[in-house]
Image (spheres, coloured by chain):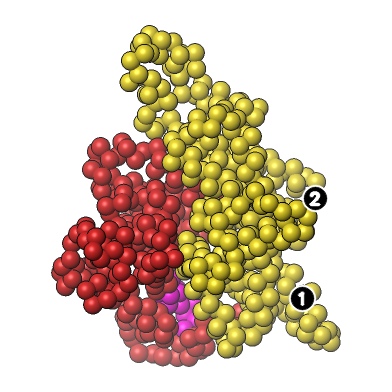
Chain colours: A yellow, B red
Amino acid sequence: MATYLIRRLLIAIPSLLGISVILFTILALAPGDPFSEMATNPNVPPEVREAIRASFGLNDPIWVRYLRWLTAMAQGDWGFSFASRINVDQLILQRLPTTLFVVGSSQILALCVALPVGIYAATRPYSVFDQIANTLAFIGFSLPTFFTGLLFILLFSVTLDWFPFVYRTDIAATGWRWYWEMFRQAIMPITVLGLFQAASYTRYVRSSVLDVIRLDYVTTARAKGLSERKVTLRHITRNALIPVVTLVALQMPAVFGGALVTEQIFRVPGIGSLLIDAILANDTPVIMAVTFVFSCLVVLFNLIADILYGWLDPRISFS
Amino acid sequence: MAGSTLASPSAEPTVAATASKAAVSPGRETWRRFKRHRLAVASCFILGFLVLGVVIGPWLWPVAINEIDFSAQLQGPSWAHPFGTDDLGQDILARMMYGGRISLAVGLAAMIVATTVGVIIGALAGMSRKIVDPFLMWVTDLFLSLPQLPLLLLVIYLFREQLKAVFGVEGGVFVLIVVVIGGLRWMPVARLVRAQFLSLREKEFVEAARAQGATKLRQMVNHILPNALGPVIVAATIEVSSAIIAESTLSFLGLGFPPDIPTWGRLLFDAKDQLDTAPHWALFPGAAIFLTVLSINFIGDGLRDALDPRRVI
């Protein structure tokens, strides 16, 4: 297991480097110059501008700039935000917990819906329940998060007035009341994101349960006289979960994309809405850093999935 | 007993499928199997209606999309404005028909880009027996772990101005969005094509072609590719719907098409601040996106059943 872990960690490094190369290439190819505003400023003579450019190393060959950028990023020196004059890493650290809270809770919700529904549907293929679940799953992942978000606001905030539609960090309450208010305002973003993911997870769970349900070892387990419940939970589910873990990991980029949209709709102050604000404010350091953080999160979750995979299926970690 | 659960509810047991002796062309056979998926057939009609609506609709409903009428602000659906009006009194039906053209065109064009890139990379990886395959698959996995939406936003933020200068406002954003969405979504197709190539290139008919001296390119294009097309068609169908969602998401975030090009996502973006007073403004474009995506997904599902070479249907 230990060698497996180390191998996985080592595989993650080239992907991170590859992502950093892609990001840096995009930035380097992009037109525009951080000092273009200075060029139109009559108070800054061209020589001074050229000197400033040279002092920031903007005239160096591209691979030198890449290496410098990479070492700076690795050392945690992410620059400062043009818009708010705060260090980028501080800005992201402020926002990251909210995003992780929303994404994490929505994933838990998605799995809580998808696992029982998918398993129950697969144990009764083509029953009424299965067909309804399948159709609902189709509808679920055809409904984009921005539309469900607006529908939720329309229904639960505007018409019924149950939940607030703006996420606030400055709730004027303490103790239990604070937790209650946090919970109440987090319900809608989490549900929107969770149900969207639950729809595709349900299909994965159903099809992978269908793959194992007719295997001989399941028949053996039944023949031994185990209860149906035990067969389903112990024998079928555990083996069916192995491919599901991979598919869930592959969904991670889509999850963070969905989180970005959800944060924007409900004004959740996470890194997704930070990215949108930064783009609208032309705040390049923040945009680069947030995109990089998103990539790191995806790689991290893929790593976790790989480790889970090795734990669920010991054959993989030994090979 | 492995695999005795049929892959689809409209399936019939394999025995019956092989028993039917009547020689029918593959196309007709596919259509016969596709027809069994009722939701897919219904989706064809819905999608056809939507496409007709955006293509010939503007002739039947000749209202200018930018005709401002302050006397009819934020009105609900009426005979004069079947889908209501927005905050400038512009007719939402006319705007939706115009924007729908762009939304659907982006979906189709991005699908073509993604499928072409995916087929080329998958075919190269699947045919090579040396270093190319692992390298291309590493690149594919790398792209799969990129967060697409943030990256899309980043690229559009950085390149929008430049392309606007080259292709004009509308064309520049269109080219950019199509290329970027297509360029970030080719990976599933590439993986599919590679898997198909890996198994097909060892089949007897390819060996026969090789024995006759067919070049590698001829083997790929004439012999392997036609047999690998089934899953690619299915994946391409799904690609259209995800490209439409991607474009709508961008426009919804206010970073896609400019305000004078009312794609469905852009209409939602404009409508979201007036949800309490004019819900119809958001509901109609949202429903259009939903119906399009849903029907394309159902058609993809029907095609998957119909093109499955295992002939479970």
User: Does residue B55 sit above or below B67 in this rendering?
Assistant: below
Question: Mark on residue B20?
Answer: none
Q: Which residue is denoted by mark 2 in the rendering? A: A1
The amino acid type, in three-letter code, at marker 2 is Met
Q: Quadrant of residue B112 in the image?
A: bottom left
Tell me: A144 left or right of A39: right
Residue B277 in view, yes or no: yes
* Residue A233 numbered mark, or none: 1
Left or right of A119 in this view: B108: left
Asked whether the residues under marks 2 and 1 belong to the same chain, the reply is yes
Residue B278 spot, x, y in % from top left: 38, 67
Q: What element carries label 2?
A: loop
Percent coordinates x, y for residue B58 in the rendering = 19, 67
Disc 2 vs disc 1: which is toward the camera? 1
Whether A34 is drawn above or below A186: the answer is above
For the residue pair B292 and B222, the one nearer the viewer reads as B292
- Range shown magenta: B296-313
Residue at the spot x=33%, y=86% of the render? Answer: B23
User: Within the image, what quadrant is residue A180 found in?
Assistant: bottom right
Relative image position of residue B7 (x, y in whole percent): 54, 79
- Residue A281 covered by magenta stretch: no
Identified at 36% across, 31% down, the residue is A31
SS of the residue under disc 1: helix
